Image (tube, helix red, strand yellow):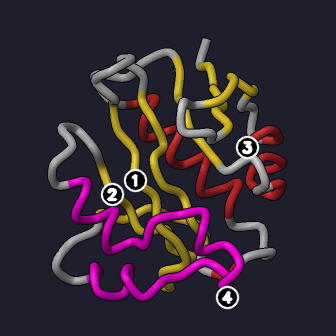
Amino acid sequence: MITLHVIDKDNWEDCIRLKPKPEQEKWIAPNLYSIAEAQFMEGFETRAIYHDDEMIGFVMYGPHSCDDNYWIYRFMIDGRFQGQHYAKPAIRLVLDEIRKASDRTDHVMLCYKPENERAKTIYTQMGFQEAGYAPWGDAMAKYSYI
């Protein structure tokens, strides 16, 4: 069973030990950086992704002030747990949390490196649609609740 848990004093050190596969490290900031960054981003949430009682991944999301959409800023499954079909259930849980938020928006945005074909495939299968490119070169995708 996949669940999301708040990052807190009891699990943050486990979270910062999670890592993507070495060849993927260029595509995502370390979890320690993301946990620190979220402290300064109004309304942003960090969650640990668990399979049963084992932490397997990390996600950071929240409303972005520049476009008033929710954004999934970071999403990662530890390299040891990739390929075990955990990503899609975890993304569903994140989308459900956002949908239930009192300040939810009709759209959820995310970015990924254009060369990250696996991310593109997963996000497309989850219902995200291509939405152009960010000024810094990342591909953008949008999920609509409506």
- What is the C-alpha distance between the residues marked 4 and 1? 20 Å
Which amino acid is tagged 2? Thr
Q: Decide which of 81, 102 is in the foreground and name it.
A: 81
Q: In the structure shown, which secondary structural element does the residue marked by tag 4 occupy?
A: helix
Asked whether the residues under the numbered discs 2 and 4 touch, taking CB atoms below 8 Å apart as contact, a structural biologist would say no
The reply to whether residue 94 is in sight is yes
Visible residue check, residue 52: no
Q: Of the numbered discs in the image, which one, if any, rests on residue 80?
A: 4
Q: Mark 3 = which residue?
A: 123
Label 1 – label 2 distance at C-alpha: 4 Å
Label 3 CA crowd tier, 10 Å (few <14, some 14–19, many 20+): many
Residue type indicated by callout 4: Arg
> Nearer the N terminus, badge 4 or badge 3?
4
Residue 117 in magenta?
no
The residue to which callout 2 is attached is: 46
- Residue 141 image point, x, y percent: 66, 31
Which comes before the other along the chain, label 4 or label 1?
Answer: 1
- Residue 50 picture location, percent across and down: 50, 73
Alpha carbons under labels 3 and 1: distance apart: 16 Å
Q: Residue drawn 16% across and 55% down?
A: 39
Bin the neighbour count of mark 1 within 10 Å (Cα to Cα): few under 14, some 14-19, many 20 and up.
many
Q: Is residue 109 above or below residue 27?
A: above
User: Decide: marks 1, 2 in contact (CB < 8 A)?
Assistant: yes
**Quick check: 104 left or right of 50?**
left
Q: Amino acid at mark 1?
A: Met
Stretch in magenta: 11-38
Sequence-earlier tag: 3 or 1: 1
Image coords of residue 83 (percent x, y): 80, 74
Q: Residue at x 71, y 31 (%)?
A: 128
Location of mark 1 (residue)? 60
